[in-house]
Amino acid sequence: MNFSWKEDLPNDLQNKITKVETMIEPKLKEVDEQVLYNQQRVLNLFRENRVAEEDLIGSTGYGYDDPGRDKIEKIYAGYFKADDALVRSQLASGTHAITTSLFSILRPKDTLYYMTGMPYDTIQEVIGIAGNNPGTMKEYGIDFDYTPLLDNGEVDFDSAIKTLKENKSIKVVALQRSRGYAVRDSFTVAKIAKMIKVIKKYAPNAVIFVDNCYGEFSETEEPTFYGADLMAGSLYKNAGAGIVKSGAYIVGRKDLIEGAGARLTVPGAGKGEGATYAYLRDFYQGFFMAAHTTGEALKGTIFTAALLEEMGMSVSPRWDAKRTDIVQTVTFGESESMIKFCAAIQHFSPMNSFVDPIPSHQDGYVDDVIMASGSFTEGSTIELSSDGPLRPPYSLYIQGGLSFAHVKIAIAQAVNETFSLQI
């Protein structure tokens, strides 16, 4: 019996998809090899740490003496080549993990310095340079500085070095791996390694912090391999593989993890508290599946970039570029097509496919945001989703995908709905 998943699409679009599938095949094979390498490292860590069924039970109350929690944190530390880790459901999001990390280090009159340009919207609100919220760094007397990126989206090393040499109050130098809502390329691990080398030379006493959201398992290396002191990310992005329902992680130097643990719970108890009850099974299974699931999402971004380029759209990164996260950007230049494309992704999601997303205000963001997320876990961006602020140049950020098959179907249908008059 002959069948094709493309049969309900216009012939011209079918031909474009067939062309794209052939073109990206070598790139997809590269992803497969990367997945195998990362999967082997994870499997070895599970075996070395003798993970057993009793490690999945979890704890209640204070969470004292939780061997399953201790072991998953040892596995995270091992994978990221760090001294120690916090892997906790009590961390509500990547932004919460970042905030916990930064507040555990910074004190009044210290400076938080972003070398990778202005951080994304939610972190701006944490700092206190956007919004009007209580409990910001500004309210605590913590200073903020950053170096704008060059026009090509790269770090301005000349200006950064000048700042590092002159501002003696810099306590933390932060590096944002993913682009956030900027149009710049995300920074590869190789580029972050260069930044770390410069920081260690010109500000050797500063703590180097990396926001690793969207980046885990996207390469065979991580920023902590090259000397990042502390790093954080979300468990309902790459590291949780769509299995983990809530939580985030922090990895890094032992003393800094102890400080983050004291900030998350209380001084004295620190990371020794924190019940895991029903979460550990998801934490273990999610991390075990993370290499594979991230690979599926990466394949989806490659297909998305190639097909949208074929439609004449401006995309970043290009389909054949080196990737360091699961985010794909397409720029529409105006709001109508952006909203229409985002809505189409919602229409071809497994959850709430009957819903039309409407631009609206969201906590943590200054501009109205359009968002499609028919995911099983609310806010999960390892599952296929798309979002973006309603502001020029009207770029939509497409991320995730639990299966490459789903991404192909949804993106093809979104192209059909959005560009039907042009096909």
Image (cartoon, helix red, strand yellow):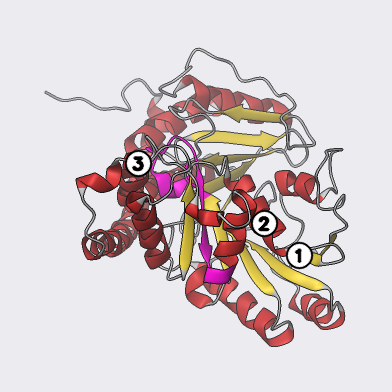
In contact (CB < 8 Å): disc 1 and disc 3: no
Name which of mark 2 and mark 1 comes first in the sequence: 1
Identify the mark at residue 80; answer none if there is no mark.
Answer: none
Q: Is residue 273 visible?
A: yes
| Of the pair 354 and 363, the residue shown nearer to us | 363
- Specify the amino acid type for callout 2: Arg
Q: Helix, strand, or loop for circle 3?
A: loop
Residue 338 placement (x, y as % from top left): 65, 31
228 up-or-down from 295: above or below: below
Residue drawn at the location 78% of the way across and 44% of the way down: 125
- Specify the amino acid type for callout 1: Leu
Quickly name the residue at label 1.
Answer: 149
Q: Can residue 214 be seen in this view?
A: no
Q: The N terminus appears in which quarter of the rendering?
A: top left
Residue drawn at the location 75% of the way across and 71% of the way down: 171
Q: Is residue 342 magenta?
A: no
Q: Distance from label 2 to label 3 (Cα)?
A: 41 Å
Could you tell whether 423 is left or right of 365 in the image?
Answer: left
Which residue is most to the left? 1
Q: Helix, strand, or loop for circle 1?
A: loop
Identify the mark at residue 58; answer none if there is no mark.
Answer: 3
Residue drawn at the location 75% of the way across and 61% of the way down: 117
Name which of mark 1 and mark 3 comes first in the sequence: 3
